[in-house]
């Protein structure tokens, strides 16, 4: 049985164990040389990161043919209308080709959401909106590129769920065995 760790990756932490200059890494939070990361989460993204000691399990989680759904909370600039969200639902075209259709709903700020340090930029004249976006592929910075393609850049991105696992009540920097 694979050992699976659920970790709430804080903002500006590299999704790797080895040092890279003065940037924070997973090694600052988890000390287990047998664990490997199942997928990646950008330096400036937050939320659920999964780790395991089982390479075959990791491969099943990250390989595109398995289409494991990943759900994100994206705080975007502006207030996308339904027509814009429909573009994402139908599969927006990105520079590296069309993205698979996404499940997208407009939501209120997720309950219990932690403050980000530093906070996102605030502009009184430009509103923001939260979207819940579920995709089944994982291209580089895909959600950010998708929201930018409809004219609503992502200001804050949090992965809330991967497959059957969710971030639950984990606070940034906390982890638990699944």
Image (spheres, rainbow, N blue to C red):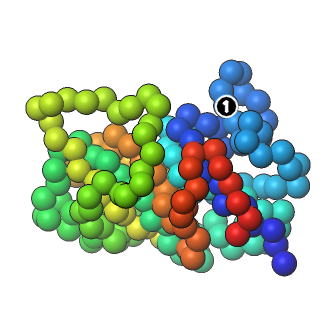
Check the picture and name the quadrant holding the C terminus: bottom right
Give the farthest residue toward the right. Answer: 33
In this rendered view, identify the residue nearer to me: 169 or 121.
169
Residue 112's place in the image compared with 166, above or below, is above
Give residue 176's position: percent from left, percent from top. Answer: 70, 60
Is residue 20 or residue 10 the one in the foreground? 10
Question: Which percent across, then down, holds residue 133?
Answer: 36, 63
Instruction: Point out the residue furthest to the top here.
Output: 22
- Seen at 28% across and 46% down, the residue is 76
Task: State the image coordinates of residue 3 (x, y, percent, origin top left).
Answer: 81, 68
Q: Is residue 168 left or right of residue 102?
A: right
Query: Does the rendering let one see residue 83?
Result: yes
In the figure, residue 101 lies in which quadrant? bottom left
Residue sitting at 34 percent across and 71 percent down?
Answer: 103
Q: Tell me if I can see residue 93 in this picture.
A: no
42 or 92, which lies in front? 42
Is disc 1 placed on a helix, strand or loop? strand
């Amino acid at each position: 049985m694979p050992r699976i760790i659920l970790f709430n990756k804080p903002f500006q932490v590299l999704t790797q164990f080895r040092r890279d200059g003065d940037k924070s890494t997973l090694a600052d939070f988890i000390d287990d040389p047998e664990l490997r990361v199942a997928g990646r989460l950008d330096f400036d993204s937050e939320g659920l990161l999964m780790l395991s000691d089982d390479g075959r399990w990791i491969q099943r989680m990250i390989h595109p043919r398995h289409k494991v759904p990943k759900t994100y909370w994206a705080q975007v600039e502006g207030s996308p209308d339904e027509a814009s969200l429909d573009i994402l639902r139908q599969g927006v075209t990105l520079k590296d080709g069309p993205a698979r259709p996404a499940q997208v709903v407009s939501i209120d700020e997720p309950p219990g959401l932690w403050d980000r340090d530093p906070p996102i930029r605030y502009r009184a004249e430009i509103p923001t909106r939260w979207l819940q976006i579920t995709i089944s592929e994982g291209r580089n910075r895909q959600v950010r590129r998708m929201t930018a393609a409809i004219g609503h850049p992502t200001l804050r991105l949090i992965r809330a769920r991967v497959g059957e696992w969710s971030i639950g009540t984990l606070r940034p920097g906390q982890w638990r065995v699944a």
